[in-house]
Image (tube, rainbow, N blue to C red):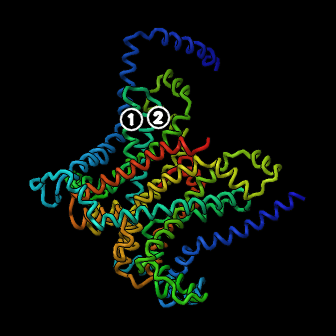
Amino acid sequence: MQQSSTSKPNMKQSNTRVKRSVTASQRKHLRMKDTIAGYLFIAPMVLLATVLTIIPILLSGVISFTDWNFIAGLDSIQFIGLENYVKMFDDDEFLRSLTNNLLLMLVIPVSLFIALILAVLINNATYFKDVFKVIYFMPFISSFVAVAVLWRVLFHPTSGPINSFLMSIGISNPPAWLADPSFSLISVMIIMIWAGIGFEMIIFMAGLQNISRDLYEAAEIDGANKVRQFFSLTIPLLTPTIFFLLITGIVGSFKVFDLIMILTGGGPAGSTSVIVYYLYKVAFIQLKSGYASAIGIMLLIIILIITIIQWIGQKKWVNY
Amino acid sequence: MRMRALQGYRLIATIGMSFGGIIFIMPFLWMISASLKPELDVLAFPIEWIPKTWNAAENYSEVWFGALPFTTYYWNTIKITLFTTLLSVVVSSMAAYGFTKIEFRGRDLVFLVILSTFMIPTQAILVPQFILYRWLGFFDSHAGLVFLGASSVLLTFLLRQFYMSVHNEIIESAKIDGANHWTIYARITLPLVKPVLATVMILRFIWTWNDYQNPLIFLRSDHLFTLQLGMTKFSDANGEFYSLMMAGAVSAILPLLIIFIIGQKQVIEGVASGSVKG
């Protein structure tokens, strides 16, 4: 016991001595060691990202200028310049998919509005907060496969529970939902809203925690009612969160693949086809690798544009 | 007086929200209910929420031990998910440590490049990935899927945020005591970021378990299929048997539901703090 207590100050002394005696060359050596250690630590991540993402995206860029089909082998590769990109704007199926993607963006503001109201209500006005959180979060943990299989039955045109219910309350001609080209995209949107609300609600609740209670009390004293408080206090103070969710949501809506693939396969009559689904079809069913890569690059460009808008918009519209 | 008004308001809001919650969760309740019934009762209206005749044992045994090797799919999914989660946590936490706690030239540039790959939609690189995988011999193998899942930029970013909050003094003093970076990483910082690791693991687990796109593209052989692929195959084969499809869907969701209920705090807080999107 005694020994250890006396040895402690000694150690400290020796430490300072070591520190002082570090010469320039030793420092260089240490920095070298740190550099090696640093690169070793990030090596697995960098290696995976390089092989699985960076090299593929560069290859994708190259392939997008060819008319290649990967089954045919490297010999048949032929550069055709920008032809794939030009072709896209004459391709009805691509334009249809792009239009559908643009329409699907509408899902985000709608679900954000619902999620925000739910978050405010659950946060301020209910008992059993955790139970509600779990309920609304359920779709987030369910696979899109299970969700799609489930909703396909729920939306069944003649005998599904939703239409049975609608008919029982007196709607004699309910829509055929997923089977009707003019309702199919709306049906997909309903499912996307249902599946997305939980995530957005949780983020909003985290944002609400950061708003000071004093502000609401002050508003109350000034005679502002709850609705007024919501529009003049909560929404402006949450603009950073709203903006973040809007952008990630819109970017995310361009990547919805599983749901479309299983729910409708892009049908009926292409009414629910989206860019990523069309890309999959071109790449792996029609086997046009060049054209598929061009669509992929186009998708990347669209996402980049949205992200740039985010950067600019953040400065303009967001209150801090 | 005001207190009482507030309580009344709360009670009304709770009742209203409960009503909304029930409608929201109804599809799931319907799914469970349908999986327990004989086929003929599934689409009966008004809906029998609690089945009059039970057919649960028959439905579930048909799913699990019927024509399709559902148990194989299940086992494959468990295997892939566990390995992916494990590897992903090691890779991401090491990278996060390297990016925050070691000073070296080029660090921030490398991080920026890695972070920017997050914007690339996975579908945009499917074709080259597919060709590369066939060339590397990772096509149609579980190892290939594990590598794809383990390289998550998002989780690295989330972990990095938390590593930044670990004080540098702790690391400096450990260094003076002669610890190298590996010891500091494994013995000192990993225990400190444990709560975030739990979040990252649960998120990775959920995403891998539910992944459909990667197995669809990178697997060919039936005996390697995952649960999600098996489910779509199952629903193609039994498209008219909704009770069986629902039993399959319940079987696929159940493990996640259990994990979610156990780790509910970690998942929800992790999502809220890192603003992660699956």
- Residue A41 tag number: 1
> What amino acid is found at the position of numbered circle 2 in the picture?
Tyr
Q: Are marks 2 and 1 on the same chain?
A: no
In percent of width and height, residue B262 lies at 58, 58
The answer to the question of whether label 2 and label 1 lie on touching residues, with beta carbons closer than 8 A, is yes
Residue drawn at 63 percent across, 72 percent down: B22
The quadrant holding residue B112 is top left
Residue drawn at 47 percent across, 70 percent down: A147
Residue B77 seen in the figure: no
In percent of width and height, residue B42 lies at 51, 86
What residue did someone put label 2 on? Answer: B185
The quadrant holding residue A280 is bottom left
The residue tagged with tag 2: helix, strand or loop? helix
Q: Taking A107 as reference, is A33 left or right? A: left
Residue drawn at 38 percent across, 32 percent down: B109
Q: Residues within 10 Å of mark 1 (few under 14, many from 20)?
A: many
In this rendering, the answer to whether B127 lies above or below B15 is above
- The quadrant of the picture occupied by the N terminus of chain A is top right
